[in-house]
Amino acid sequence: MINRRQAALDLFDELGDAVPVFGGVAHLSETQAAVGQRLRGLLGLADLTQLAWTNEWQAWRAWRAAVEASGVLVFQFTKVELEEVRGLSLLDTPMPVVGINSKERVPEAKAFTLLHEVVHLMLAAGHEELPANQEKRTGAQWMDIERFAESAASHALLPEALLQSYAAPLLGNSGQWTLQEVRRLARRFWITPLAMATRLRESGLMTWARYNAWRDEWQDYVATLPKRSGGFATPAEKTFNRYGRPFVQLVLEAMAINRITSVDAACYLDLKFQHFDQLKNIVNGPSSAGALNG
């Protein structure tokens, strides 16, 4: 991903285009709700837009596109187990990077990880965080940063006012939310049920006791679910999913005006040239569900 980011910067230079600048900044002295609200504003996703999504993959595509439009490269990586890492961020500027583990099959979880990592980018821009090999914080201190990023990401995914408007009218059981009630509410906004339960607890709509019991119930329920399959994707679709629209467009544009050769483009994208026509169709045409469901 480091090499891919540098390739993107080189291609911007070759094309004579300005490199997008990510403008998000956050400080640990702020509330997580304030940081989440600022991130949501930066991404420009309106409440009505979110409520109009019809499935979880549409939600994931929209969050990813909004982050990419803000000046962040979003890549997906393979061959690393989820137990090791779900996401990471490269704090270099311009064009910082967020990486998402492609083994994550739940699109709502991908979106949460994406915004979580963007919060880390905002903290780095506010001089609150350094690359991991330069950090001097203890493990416990680092966990405080992680909890801050998790909470801020949850507020970006679901603002307080929007949550209250939908959840408060349902609160007829004094915070004793059932597993199915939380699942239905989470589906309304296309976030994970666990993220929804956390937001309900943080907003005072679910008691700590019920939250802890609910988490146990949720973990027991998840253990009964079959593993999601990855489905089938063509080589062009895999490339688009892994590298993202901005990077793919840069490579195709540079090739189109003879700034790089087709051999160079194939190397940049790790894709045989015979699949380039389909890749161009994915980039230029209406995005199919299959092309981005990953």
Image (spheres, grey):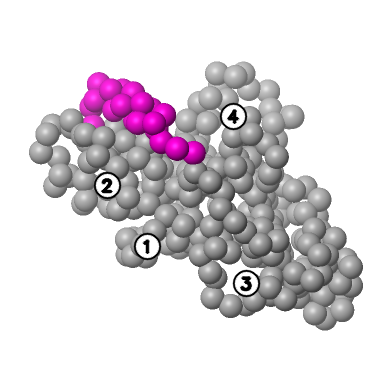
Tell me the residue that label 4 is attached to: 83
Q: Are marks 2 and 4 in contact (CB under 8 Å)?
A: no
Query: Residue at horizontal 26%, vertical 46%?
Result: 184
Identify the magenta region.
Answer: 206-227
Tell me the residue that label 2 is attached to: 185
Q: Are marks 3 and 1 in contact (CB under 8 Å)?
A: no
Query: Residue at horizontal 60%, vertical 42%?
Result: 103
Quadrant containing the C terminus in the rendered view:
bottom right
Q: Secondary structure at mark 4?
A: loop
Query: Residue at horizontal 61%, vertical 46%?
Result: 102
Mark 4 vs mark 3, CA separation in Å: 32 Å
Q: Residues within 10 Å of mark 2 (few under 14, many from 20)?
A: some
186 horizontally vs 92: left or right: left
As for residue 44 lying within the magenta part, the answer is no
Q: Secondary structure at mark 3?
A: helix
Query: Residue at horizontal 24%, vertical 39%?
Result: 180
> Could you say where residue 197 lies in the image, as x and y percent from the top left?
31, 36
Q: Are marks 3 and 2 in contact (CB under 8 Å)?
A: no
Tell me the residue that label 3 is attached to: 282
221 horizontally vs 256: left or right: left
Mark 2 vs mark 1, CA separation in Å: 14 Å
Please name the amino acid that badge 1 sits on: Trp
Mark 4 vs mark 1, CA separation in Å: 30 Å
Q: Is residue 154 visible?
A: yes
In the rendered structure, find residue 53 and report the number of the disc placed on it: 1
Q: Is residue 10 visible?
A: no
Please name the amino acid that badge 4 sits on: Glu
> Could you say where residue 286 lies in the image, as x and y percent from the top left?
54, 75
Is 136 drawn above or below residue 81 in the view shown?
A: above
First of labels 3, 2 by sequence position:
2
First of labels 4, 1 by sequence position:
1
